[in-house]
């Protein structure tokens, strides 16, 4: 972006620029399009490059909004917004902020899923950085050349292999990094000039992409093992050298790499994995909302997690973290809760069924998720007992069912009716994204449970009319956590993202939901309140960072630090040097 800005007054209302004429129109952080005033046009050599009328940003936003509605489908709307973002960043954020609830499904899930799949076919221009294997040994130089004087404080980095529930999307995974950062700015006011979307394009195993002559990414099979890790190491070293204050969000890596990377770098640089930790925080916040309605406690639940991937692991870990935190409380109860009883709260299934640690599980992370054989036996799953989803629901009688499998329609009528036989208010989260991969349609869940279920989905769904009542469907999406988590960590210059910071984000999110929202069927706040929620999450995360001794500022400086991080999309006045 701009190398032309010289000084920025505080607040950013006047900026001196060296660039002139068409150069300014090509700089998305400085371009105002038709909103350049007559005086700016004269002084900056823009006269004649725009039609006569000088407009306001609000006027421009109304024009683009009208154009959006004239598009034939969501992908075209995505492309229009993406072009706007690359042409006039401030106007893009003005529009996104004003219509966040309506436009989030376009810039993010579900439409962004389609954008990753069609990426090479619809590509117009890039706004992030693709790192490819040919940059080995030169990554720092390449990045230095791209960034020039920009200060980067936040990166969303994907290696494109596990995009939403869509799998390996090669270089097109960039659309996810771009979309997440758009939400960081819209929800938490992160300066987009300080944010960098990155795709680690070390190949793809998607045969359709490799066979497509139009595919624009690195045209080879994925690098794996030591070769892969050496490239990620070099990238991390370049980030540490050139962007020493930056926070890294690891995004949409396949679970083995996701875990390896999280373990490898979490103590080396401030970083977190959104698919594991963000998902855990958000889903457990929703479970806590359901518990508020049911007036019950987590330890008394029987929870089934369907899908033992990155998201399933994150949810299980977060539930266990909350159980451990509440543990001291249980110990004081008249009837203490034993280890086995606590272990039995969560049952996890992968594509082969219930995970039981019978000595045959090879993946270490799956052993972490599996029931000890003794617990399985206690729960009626001795050797030879069927362990598929329906069998587990019928035998274990879960009170909560969470779908993070990407298996469309896995929560079918027979299964849901079986679950609803055993529990008054079944809590069901078909969390897989995009909507096409969702385990159940919320409208069906209301129908099959006679309106008794408590539901949240991963993608946006319309309101449900059932039994004379209208229910709003909460979106149990990481977007309620990562912008606030990132803002809190950045504002206090956290050196690490601790598990307690993630826990603080989860609890704060649950506390943000209002009585009215709960009464309307929502288990998550309305997306319209995303900004308020994100700031509350940021405050809690920042305080926790101070408590954990990883912050670079003291407790009394937190409010100021968060306020100072806020970026506004208003145009500054531009003056020639
Ligand atoms: P992943 O590939 O790491 O894991 C998917 C898991 O599902 C695997 O363990 C696999 O064993 C299991 N699975 C696949 N088919 C199955 C079957 N037929 N029966 C049982 N299990 C099966 O993917 P992930 O990153 O964990 O994401 C999973 C889904 O969760 C995706 O659709 C993703 O979009 C969604 N997700 C939603 C949110 C949210 O905010 N709502 C956050 C993260 C992930």
Image (cartoon, rainbow, N blue to C red):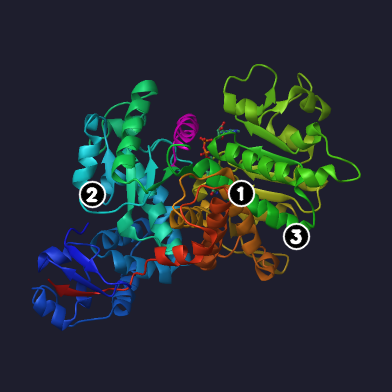
Mark nearer the N terminus (1 vs 2): 2
Q: Secondary structure at mark 3?
A: helix
Note whether 483 is above or below 302 in the view shown: below
Circle 2 crowding by C-alpha within 10 Å: few under 14, some 14–19, many from 20: some
Q: Residue at x 60, y 53 (%)?
A: 504
Q: Secondary structure at mark 1?
A: helix
| Mark 1 to mark 2 CA distance (whole Å) | 34 Å
Note whether 306 is above or below 522 in the view shown: above
Q: Residue at x 57, y 58 (%)?
A: 540
Query: Residue 91 lies in what quarter of the image?
Result: bottom left
| Mark 3 to mark 2 CA distance (whole Å) | 49 Å
- Given the current orientation, which residue lies at the most extreme top position? 359
Asked if residue 428 is among those painted magenta in the image, a careful observer would answer: no
| Mark 3 to mark 1 CA distance (whole Å) | 21 Å
Q: Secondary structure at mark 2?
A: helix
- Residue 452 seen in render: no
Residue linked to disc 3:
293
Query: Residue 55 lies in what quarter of the image?
Result: bottom left
Q: Nearer the viewer, mark 3 or mark 1?
A: 1
Q: Quadrant of the C terminus?
A: bottom left
Q: Residue at x 71, y 51 (%)?
A: 427
Does residue 394 appear to the left or right of 505 in the view shown?
right
Q: Main secondary structure of the magenta part?
A: helix
Mark nearer the N terminus (3 vs 2): 2
Q: Marks 3 and 2: CB-CB under 8 Å?
A: no
Circle 1 crowding by C-alpha within 10 Å: few under 14, some 14–19, many from 20: many
């Amino acid at each position: 972006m701009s190398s032309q800005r010289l000084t920025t007054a505080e607040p950013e209302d006047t900026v001196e620029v060296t660039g002139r004429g068409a150069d300014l129109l090509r700089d998305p952080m400085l371009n105002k399009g038709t909103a350049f005033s007559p005086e700016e046009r004269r002084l900056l050599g823009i006269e004649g490059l725009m039609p006569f009328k000088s407009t306001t940003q609000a006027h421009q936003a109304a024009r683009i909004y009208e154009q959006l509605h004239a598009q034939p489908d969501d992908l075209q709307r995505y492309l229009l917004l993406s072009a706007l973002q690359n042409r006039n960043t401030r106007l893009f954020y003005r529009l996104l902020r004003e219509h966040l609830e309506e436009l989030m499904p376009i810039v993010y899930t579900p439409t962004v899923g389609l954008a990753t799949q069609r990426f090479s076919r619809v590509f117009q221009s890039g706004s992030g950085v693709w790192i490819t294997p040919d940059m080995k040994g030169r990554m720092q130089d390449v990045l230095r050349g791209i960034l020039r004087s920009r200060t980067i404080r936040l990166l969303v980095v994907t290696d494109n292999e596990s995009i939403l529930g869509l799998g390996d999307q090669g270089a097109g995974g960039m659309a996810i990094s771009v979309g997440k950062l758009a939400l960081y700015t819209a929800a938490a006011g992160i300066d987009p000039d300080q944010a960098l979307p990155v795709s680690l394009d070390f190949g793809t195993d998607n045969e359709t992409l490799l066979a497509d002559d139009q595919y624009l990414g690195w045209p080879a099979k994925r690098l794996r093992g030591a070769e892969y890790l050496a490239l990620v190491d070099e990238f991390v070293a370049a980030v540490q050298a050139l962007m020493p204050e930056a926070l890294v969000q690891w995004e949409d890596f396949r679970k083995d790499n996701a875990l390896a990377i999280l373990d490898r770098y979490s103590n080396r640089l401030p970083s977190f994995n959104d698919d594991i930790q963000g998902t855990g925080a958000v889903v457990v916040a929703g479970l806590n909302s359901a518990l508020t309605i049911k007036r019950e406690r987590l330890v008394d639940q029987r929870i089934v997690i369907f899908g033992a991937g990155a998201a399933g692991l994150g949810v299980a870990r977060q539930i266990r973290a909350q159980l451990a935190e509440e543990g001291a409380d249980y110990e004081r109860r008249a009837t203490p809760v034993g280890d086995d009883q606590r272990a039995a709260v969560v049952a996890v299934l992968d594509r082969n069924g219930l995970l039981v640690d019978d000595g045959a599980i090879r993946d270490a992370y799956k052993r972490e998720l599996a029931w000890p054989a003794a617990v399985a036996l206690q729960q009626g799953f001795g050797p030879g007992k069927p362990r598929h989803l329906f069998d587990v629901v019928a035998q274990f009688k879960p009170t909560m069912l969470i779908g993070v499998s990407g298996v469309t329609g896995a929560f079918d009528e027979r299964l849901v009716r079986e679950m609803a036989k055993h529990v008054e208010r079944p809590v069901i989260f078909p969390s897989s994204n995009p909507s096409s991969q969702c385990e159940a349609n919320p409208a069906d869940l209301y129908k099959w449970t006679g309106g008794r279920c408590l539901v949240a989905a991963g993608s946006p769904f319309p309101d449900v009319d059932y039994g004379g009542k209208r229910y709003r469907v909460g979106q149990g999406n990481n977007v309620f956590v990562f912008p606030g988590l990132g803002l809190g960590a950045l504002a206090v210059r956290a050196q690490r993202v601790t598990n307690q910071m993630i826990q603080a984000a989860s609890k704060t999110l649950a506390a943000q939901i209002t009585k009215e929202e709960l009464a309307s069927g929502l288990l998550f706040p309305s997306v319209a309140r995303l900004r308020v929620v994100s700031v509350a999450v940021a405050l809690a995360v920042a305080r926790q960072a101070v408590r954990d001794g990883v912050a670079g500022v003291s407790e009394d400086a937190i409010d100021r630090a968060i306020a100072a991080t806020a970026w506004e999309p208003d145009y500054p006045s531009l003056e020639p040097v």
